[in-house]
Amino acid sequence: MTSSEQETMSTGRIHHPNHRTRVFALIAFMVLCLIISAFGGAVTATSVNDWYAALNKPFFRPPNWVFGPVWTVIYFMIAFSGWRAWLKVGIANAKGAFGLYAGQLTLNLAWSFLFFGAQSPLLGLIDIVILLGLIIANMVAFWKIDRLAGMLLVPYALWVAFATLLNAAIWQLN
């Protein structure tokens, strides 16, 4: 018996959404992640061409055009990961895992406001370190529910680990 089955059995609830509900939920997870992406992108756009352009950056910083496509793919993977976990046990049967999911999405968005909106690499660094911890915790929690759901968060964790190094270097150089 998998841990998700044990969790479902221990709560006495069985999660078997019908086809229409599954499709609606997938769309909802995608829309949620796209909204977060759009807000983060809008905040980033407020200073990427002036304040951020004037900062000293490390040699390993990728070109600006890389970030949009990478984040788009990652947000779709985050959405699909949440949906997969939801399919297995539902939100009510995995409140801790979905609390981590909501927390990492919130801190993900907050980073844009702190780094670009407040123009503070230090506040961004504090946020992103906590964010990385939440992503890893969410990855582990989702892995216990559905291995694919957990694996879908691995590229996100790796990218944010790289972004943490980039953020730290920018803070140090400026």
Image: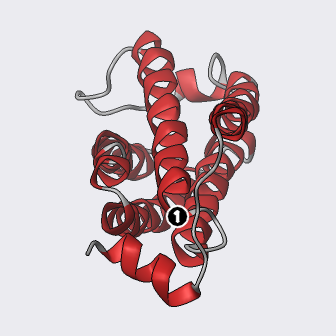
The residue lying at 31 percent from left, 50 percent from top is: 161
Q: For mark 1, does the 10 Å Cα neighbourhood hold few (<14), some (14 to 19), or many (20 or more) residues? A: many
The residue lying at 58 percent from left, 74 percent from top is: 93
Q: Is residue 173 left or right of residue 90?
A: left
Q: Which residue is mark 1?
A: 89
Task: Judge by depth and name the residue closer to the eye, 144 or 15.
Answer: 15
Amino acid type for the residue under numbered disc 1: Val
Residue 101 spot, x, y in % from top left: 56, 60
Q: Is residue 77 left or right of residue 42?
A: left
Q: Quadrant of residue 116?
A: top right
Residue 143 spot, x, y in % from top left: 31, 61
56 vs 148: above or below: above
Task: Judge by depth and name the residue closer to the eye, 65 or 169.
Answer: 65
The residue lying at 52 percent from left, 64 percent from top is: 89
25 vs 122: above or below: above
At mark 1, the secondary structure is helix
Task: Judge by depth and name the residue closer to the eye, 104 or 78.
Answer: 78
174 vs 53: above or below: below
The residue lying at 35 percent from left, 63 percent from top is: 136
Location of the N terminus by quadrant is bottom left
